[in-house]
Amino acid sequence: MPVVEDSQAVVAEEEVAVDVNAATRPVMPVAPVWLICFIAFSLFYIATPGLIPTDWRWFFKIIPILLLLQLVISRAAGTVRTLLVIALLFSATGDVLLAMEGRFVQGLGAFLLAQITYTILFTMQGRWQPQRLWWTGLIVLYALLCTVYIVPEAGNMKVPIVAYMVAISLMAISAGFREDSKFLWVAIGALVFMVSDTLIAVNRFVISLEYSGIAVMGTYYLAQALICTGVLRR
């Protein structure tokens, strides 16, 4: 009967709402001890590379990402937790591969999968909002300028670089359309992520940058932290 069908539809909608709320439930601010550990390990890896044995650099490199992983597992739930965990695992894999000689393409592929995962999450949390088209324009302009500057110097890496630029641009654009009053928290993290990866490409293909390691890793850790804590604050 129509009444029964309507009741079932209402129950189904309520179940969906419960699932979404569970996945994005409000969380307490980040614990000071966790924040101190994240900053300390990030600065240790960035500022004291000479103190870390070469064979162990990959391990110290991913400690801040592992701390973000622990934060996500303890604070998020449902699909949000699953996708954030996947994105961080792909990121950590990319970090390890990029720390190895001759594994740049594999590392790029791992980060490509991380960007795709973030894009899926942000798209699920977003909706069409014409008033935020300015953000799309900003990302597209930045991506085009970087592509024109980097790709001609990329040799046989032109296609992978363009593919990755498209993927990370879509990630950043989708971050700007998240249905969240504090959407800029995550959106700025996505833009900083683009800056970090741009620095890697410029340093590798165009011109050697002084202090590139500090700039790349500093922006990378900041970007990941803004994205993860921003999603958890939703």
Image: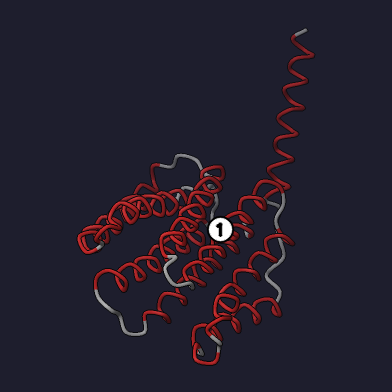
* Furthest-bottom residue in this view: 51
Q: Which of 56 and 163 is in front in this view?
A: 56
Colouring scheme applied when the structure was drawn: secondary structure
The N terminus, quarter of image: top right
How many marks do you count on the picture? 1
Where residue 82 sits: x, y (%)? 66, 50
* Furthest-top residue in this view: 1
From the viewer's perspective, is 32 left or right of 169? right
Residue kind at label 1, given as amino acid type: Phe
From the viewer's perspective, is 82 left or right of 227? right
Estimate how packed mark 1 is, as few (under 14), some (14 to 19) or many (20 or more) residues with alpha carbons within 10 Å.
many
Give the secondary structure at mark 1: helix
Q: Which of 193 and 162 is in front in this view?
A: 162
In the figure, residue 89 lies in which quadrant?
bottom right
Where residue 123 sits: x, y (%)? 51, 44
In the figure, residue 204 lies in which quadrant?
bottom left
Image: 198 above or below 211: above
- Please give the name of the residue rendered at 71% of the width and 47% of the height, measured from the top-left corner: 78
Image: 183 above or below 59: above
In the figure, residue 91 lies in which quadrant?
bottom right
Q: Name the residue under label 1.
A: 90
From the viewer's perspective, is 6 left or right of 179? right
Where residue 231 sits: x, y (%)? 59, 57
From the viewer's perspective, is 106 left or right of 81? left
Where residue 127 sits: x, y (%)? 50, 40
The C terminus, quarter of image: bottom right
